Image: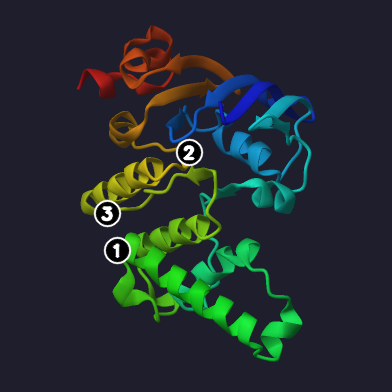
């Protein structure tokens, strides 16, 4: 497995937000992470991405333990993410926001860029072309020069996904990427997630849209009160009585 968690626990005072979570994400797999509000889903993403350190357990990326590493080191190893709350630079254009995500792949030092030396200029042009290609991929080619603050909510979400892709990650962590979107926008994000996986990137997806999760995920892990209560294919999870009781309820039956 490309990414695996074993017995991961995170406590805040006396509360275990993540309590012994174990799961594995394969290469090129879309792995859903679902559960009720407060189940520990975003906390788990924060642990994987290095925003917080686990109290116990192991997080392994391609054979290397990464728990406790700072977030910039984990990003450099190939894990990028989006957030529940949009975190774009509102005064920058869509293209420039995506360029920010490509900084891990830039080799020319700052002084070369400031002096406009040929090697830095070539790299800058390639990075900008790459940003435009990613915006085209997420359906925003015509909005590349627009300030992020002028984009719609759904467009900003797609810029965030393009920025996460800009570093050519091995694993993408998507935290509710379709929140606030209309059905057409949700369908476009579903197609984009499938395309990301088909290109060889793994995806760990936190999402409340159950239909989307069932449609795009190869496997699903269900959290409840910080604990894994189910793990399997979408059909297996949909039939699990513990999942139906804790989260899905009548949605699956419908």
Q: Quadrant of the C terminus?
A: top left
Mark 2 crowd level (few <14, some 14–19, many ≥20, 10 Å Cα): many
Identify whether 247 is placed above or below 192: above
**Residue identifier under label 1:** 139
**Residue identifier under label 3:** 185
Considering the numbered disc 2 on the image, is that residue within a helix, a strand or a loop? strand
Residue located at (71% from left, 49% from top): 71
Distance of mark 1 from mark 2, alpha carbons? 21 Å
Residue contact between numbered discs 3 and 2, judged by CB atoms under 8 Å: no
The answer to which of marks 1 and 3 sits earlier in the sequence is 1
Residue located at (38% from left, 72% from top): 151
The answer to which of marks 1 and 2 sits earlier in the sequence is 1
Residue contact between numbered discs 1 and 2, judged by CB atoms under 8 Å: no
Question: Where does the image place residue 15, in percent across and percent down from the top left?
Answer: 72, 26
Distance of mark 3 from mark 2, alpha carbons? 22 Å
Closer to the eye: label 1 or 3: 1
Considering the numbered disc 1 on the image, is that residue within a helix, a strand or a loop? loop
The answer to which of marks 3 and 2 sits earlier in the sequence is 3
Considering the numbered disc 3 on the image, is that residue within a helix, a strand or a loop? helix
Closer to the eye: label 1 or 2: 2
Residue located at (28% from left, 32% from top): 215
Nearer the observer, 37 or 30: 30
Identity of the residue furthest to the top in this view: 241
Nearer the observer, 32 or 90: 32
């Amino acid at each position: 497995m490309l990414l695996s968690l074993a017995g991961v626990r995170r406590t805040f005072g006396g509360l275990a937000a993540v309590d012994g979570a174990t799961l594995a994400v394969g290469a090129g797999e879309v792995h859903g992470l679902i559960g009720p509000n407060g189940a520990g889903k975003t906390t788990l993403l924060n642990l994987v991405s290095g925003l917080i350190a686990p109290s116990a357990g192991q997080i392994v990326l391609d054979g290397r333990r990464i728990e406790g590493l700072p977030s910039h080191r984990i990003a450099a190893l190939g894990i990028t993410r989006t957030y529940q709350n949009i975190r774009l630079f509102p005064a920058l254009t869509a293209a420039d926001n995506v360029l920010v995500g490509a900084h891990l792949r830039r080799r020319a030092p700052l002084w070369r860029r400031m002096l406009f030396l040929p090697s830095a200029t070539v790299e800058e042009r390639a990075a900008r072309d790459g940003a435009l290609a990613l915006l085209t991929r997420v359906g925003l080619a015509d909005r590349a020069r627009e300030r992020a603050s002028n984009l719609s909510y759904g467009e900003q979400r797609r810029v965030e996904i393009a920025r996460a892709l800009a570093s050519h990650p091995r694993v993408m962590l998507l935290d509710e990427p379709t929140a606030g979107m209309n059905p057409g926008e949700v369908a476009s994000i579903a197609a984009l997630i499938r395309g990301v996986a088909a290109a060889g990137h793994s995806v760990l997806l936190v999402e409340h849209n159950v239909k989307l999760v069932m449609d795009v995920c190869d496997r699903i892990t269900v959290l409840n009160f910080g604990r894994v209560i189910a793990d399997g294919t979408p059909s297996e999870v949909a039939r699990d009585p513990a999942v139906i009781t804790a989260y899905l309820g009548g949605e699956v039956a419908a």
